[in-house]
Amino acid sequence: MVPVATKVTPALRIYRGILLLATPFILLRLWWRGRREPEYRRRIGERFGFVQLPDGRPIIWFHAVSAGEVIAAAPLIRRIAKQHSQHQVLVTTMTPTGAEQVRGLLGDAVVHKYAPYDMTFAVQRYWQQVRPAVLVLMETELWPNLIHQAATESVPICLINARLSERSARGYRRLATLSRSMLAQLTHVSCQYPAHAERFRSLGVDSKRLSIAGNLKFDRAIPEDLTARRDDLMTRCRLQGRPIWLAASTHSGEEAQILQCYEQLRAGFPQLQLILAPRHPHRAEELVQLSEAAGFQPRRLSSLTQSPLEAPAGVVIVDQMGMLLPLYDLADVAFVGGSLIPFGGQNPIEPALMRTPVVSGMHCFNFTEIVEKLVSVGAMFQVSSVAALAETIAKLLDDAELRSRAGAAGYAEAMANKGASERVAERLIELIGDTAQ
């Protein structure tokens, strides 16, 4: 491992001061989120550095912010835990949804804790208890204090599945006095695509510390009970024989447009069923009210676990985590959200894995390369208005052959891009082996 500068720069001091001043507001925000999601009020001490681990084995620390990153990293984490059974694997998240995915996908193979906020006292207290042999960060989880602490302790830091949009790169350039020293402390950056590696290089990351492995999300494991779960949803929601449109990972500002589109589509497809799966399930009640105001009779998916529908609902609203794969599997057409508004889009790989045609808005800058691949092979369709959305959905619903071709093209593209987990695992195994010598 090449030594790097670990001096506390003036920019880092300013950053630390700002975070310290922001501590009351961070606590207030945590309390406020806990009103809607009670899990945010549990294990608060971990977020401020109070953490205990069950045994004294050396630790491999993976940090993934939320559910999507955990799902993407799960095959890799299982591989590393099996390969290095003499180590304890710690997986940290910032969100309860991420914690839920750790429990469901990794179980007893790892230990889950919430990550510390990037305040100096929290990071240092956390570090005293964890003292990892290796720190592995996912995608964009670049926290100056955490990275500085690892570098100070000469602990290798690997950023995996790294992505850096041009928009984010511009932000790092504006904060170059802070970001340049932080990026220089990374031992290795495993990027999704060449464009991401080039942006990291432009920010000062040495080419020798960069590699391109592809996107871990293409290696998503398909659950063995997927078909059974899909069939159960079909029965409980009374979907047999009906065309199904799934609007998944939607954000505030999109659902009203989707409901407007749904109203237009029902004129030509009176049996059409909309399933609305917001990015954050705690927004379900908000969407119930929105659907009612639009003239539909909504039902929460969780309410159907005990009492299946006697008649189809106007809109089925998904208020549970871990449902997207079977929902993508049963849908005829999927819309992937975060894209009708300038959020940057959500992951379109999962519907491709399920052979389901994908429609999105134009704002997909967080997944530029993936979207370009899927659009180019005819698996994904982008629209810029509610009218275009309705037209595209109608075209797909009306043409079974087009749906089949689009679904097959998406699946073929997903299969062609698998293998990132194995490539990243080889690099991590080598890095972990070096720390043991």
Image (spheres, grey):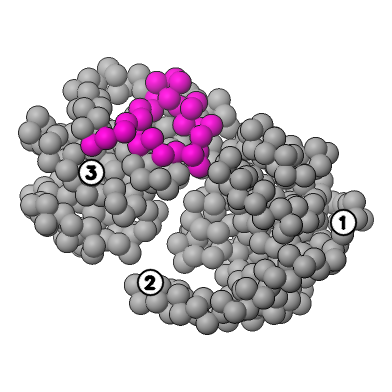
Q: Nearer the viewer, residue 21 or 59?
A: 21
Image point 18% across, 23% down: which residue? Answer: 398
How far from the left and from the top, in percent, is residue 253?
29, 51
How far from the left and from the top, in percent, is residue 50?
64, 81
Quadrant housing residue 427: top right
Q: Could you say which disc has been placed on residue 254 in the image? A: none
Give the vertical position of 398 relative to 187 (above or below).
Answer: above
| Residue range (magenta) | 360-386
Secondary structure at numbered mark 3: helix
Q: Amino acid at mark 2?
A: Glu
Q: Nearer the viewer, residue 112 or 249?
A: 249
Q: Amino acid at mark 3?
A: Ile
Q: Could you say which disc has been placed on residue 4 in the image? A: 1
Instruction: Give the side of residue 223 with respect to residue 232, left or right.
Output: right
Q: Earlier in the sequence, mark 3 or mark 1?
A: 1
Q: Could you say which disc has been placed on residue 37 in the image? A: 2
Asked if the magenta segment contains residue 381, the reply would be yes
Instruction: Give the side of residue 272 with respect to residue 125, left or right.
Output: left
Q: Which residue is mark 3?
A: 258
Rate crowding at label 1 as few (under 14), some (14 to 19) or many (20 or more) other CA atoms within 10 Å.
Answer: some
Give the vertical position of 419 relative to 340 (above or below).
Answer: above
How far from the left and from the top, in percent, is residue 8?
81, 68
